[in-house]
Amino acid sequence: MIDEYKNIAPKGDLMLLGKLGETLRSRSFLHVNSTREGGGVAEILHRMIPILRELGIDARWEVIEGDARFFDITKKIHNALQGNEEIMTEQMWAYHGEVNERNAKKLNLEADAVLIHDPQPAALIHYRKGGIWMWRCHIDASGPHMAVWNALKRHCEKYDAAVFSVAKFARALPVEEFIIPPSIDPVSEKNRELTAGEIDEAANRFGISRDRPVLLQVSRFDRFKDPIGVIKAYRMAKKYNDCVLVLAGSPASDDPEGEAVLNEVREYASDDRDIIILLLPAFSDRDINALQRMATVVLQKSLKEGFGLTVSEAMWKEKPVLGGAVGGIPLQVVHGVNGFLVHSTEGAAFRIRQLLTNPAMAKRMGERGKEYVRTNFLITRQVRDYLSMWYAMEHRGKRVLDL
């Protein structure tokens, strides 16, 4: 499997991966999150676990179970970390702890290194059974609702380390902190090269006209992704440039608000035949790949965003991206070089028109974007960073080996 990346990923990343694999061979590395499908965390883990195993590491992935009440609570925590004013009672926090306790009794939490992803399983730290425990926050926590953050912090400060996607997301904690951005897998079904026939087949199946420019946003149906704002920007641009808008997303089992937001979007777009809304089943990777490759311009007009893997996915396919100037998107989009950062609906509409009327500029931006992703946001780099963090945590205060 690692051989597939030889002519794609930077050579230095692959060399260091080999050295780290030799050093950590036969050691155990456990990841825990809240869903096996839907969202970037699950997507990365599906691809990362096999790579870790090929390096000789005993990698496992466990998923905590919870009911509707639990995921309603964790959605409030998620939204509060992104700045919403959410009311979290002591009863809610107690139930969050109860669910974590039940899962701790069922799951095998023994490993040399344990990486807990996001707030849902954060309380598992109280049931650790040795090893290095690290908490990974994929959320934009740069301006959280402080009462909720302070309550969650009671768990986070008991870890050995905390990991954030972007430096400005990091919160003050009495533990080691690392900055590790997420990544995409260039050889996965979602990002591999497709034939023209495969792209055409998907366009025909979804009823997408190829005789006009296609605007695309791929994301969960979440208010922070601003799908209504995308429709407004499209309508402004369409007055001058005839085009089609596609909004595509998949449900996530740990997001109870998705259906309500989808219904709002359908109602808002109902009178426009050139707006195509697609609720794709989980693991629709090739369809998403085809949608991104047929797009003229890809949007990720988020109001809050932990990182936004769809930005790097589109850039890998040499598409110019319009991204909200929030969260981890500015880490990926270099404004005016490989895409544009936007601050408003009107700004998004202006940049859409600029790209549609200047295809040569759009092509240059797409080409630069692919190289930027190759250098910074491929999965080989993220695996390298996780293993380097684990190695560093185990060798604190010791003489470090010459890797």
Image (tube, grey):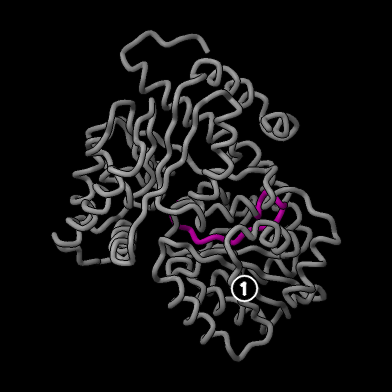
User: Residue 267: x percent and y percent?
Assistant: 51, 87
Q: Who is closer to the viewer here, 330 or 38?
A: 38
User: Residue 313: x percent and y percent?
Assistant: 63, 52
Which quadrant of the structure image shows residue 260? Answer: bottom left
Q: How many marks?
A: 1
Residue 115 seen in this snapshot: yes
Q: Write down the residue under mark 1.
A: 278
Q: Who is closer to the viewer here, 138 or 331?
A: 138
Question: Which segment did they paint magenta?
Answer: 314-327
Give me the residue at 28% from left, 43% from top.
Answer: 105
Q: Residues within 10 Å of mark 1 (few under 14, many from 20)?
A: some
Image height of 242 relative to 388, above or below: below
- Decide if residue 89 is on the left or right side of residue 222: left
User: Residue 330: x percent and y percent?
Assistant: 50, 51
Residue 317, magenta (yes or no): yes
Query: The N terminus is located in which quarter?
Result: top right
Q: Looking at numbered disc 1 in the image, what kind of residue is underneath it?
A: Leu
Residue at the front extreme? 106
Give me the residue at 39% from left, 37% from top.
Answer: 115
